Image (cartoon, rainbow, N blue to C red):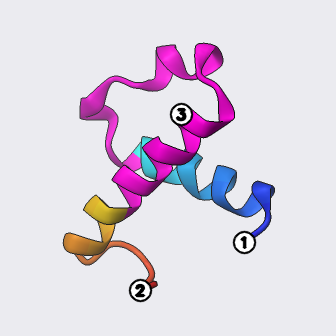
Amino acid sequence: MTPNDWLKRLESLLAHYPQYGIGPDLAGMAMIDLWGLWQFLERLAQEAGHGPAP
């Protein structure tokens, strides 16, 4: 997966899960933090049946 792919998916996941209120904090997050956030939200989406299978 290229950096652009997972960042685009992260953007989609953040729109799908606004209740976590992470949007305002994105600018201050390091890439490794964004990657961890993507993994967390991706797992939530998969468990809910909203994401692609690994």
Secondary-structure class at tag 1 = loop
* Image quadrant in which you'd find residue 42: bottom left
The residue lying at 30 percent from left, 73 percent from top is 46
Determine which of the numbered discs, if any, sits on residue 33 in the image: 3
Q: Amino acid at mark 3?
A: Asp
- The residue tagged 2 is 53
Q: For mark 3, does the 10 Å Cα neighbourhood hold few (<14), some (14 to 19), or many (20 or more) residues? A: few
Q: For mark 1, does the 10 Å Cα neighbourhood hold few (<14), some (14 to 19), or many (20 or more) residues? A: few
Q: Which of 3 and 45 lies nearest the eye of the viewer?
A: 3
- The residue tagged 1 is 1
| The residue positioned farthest toward the bottom in the image shown | 53
- Which residues lie in the magenta part? 16-42
Secondary-structure class at tag 2 = loop
Q: Amino acid at mark 1?
A: Met
Where residue 4 appears, as percent x and y from the top left, is 79, 56
Mark 3 vs 2: CB contact within 8 A: no
Mark positioned earlier in the residue sequence (1 or 3): 1
Q: Is residue 25 above or below residue 20?
A: above
Q: For mark 2, does the 10 Å Cα neighbourhood hold few (<14), some (14 to 19), or many (20 or more) residues? A: few
Q: Amino acid at mark 2?
A: Ala
Dominant SS type (magenta): helix
Where residue 49 appears, as percent x and y from the top left, is 25, 78
Mark 3 or 2, closer to the camera: 3
Give the quadrant of the N terminus. Answer: bottom right
Mark positioned earlier in the residue sequence (1 or 2): 1
Where residue 14 appears, as percent x and y from the top left, is 44, 42
Tell me the distance, in whole angstroms, between the alpha carbons under discs 1 and 3: 17 Å
Mark positioned earlier in the residue sequence (3 or 2): 3
Mark 1 vs 3: CB contact within 8 A: no
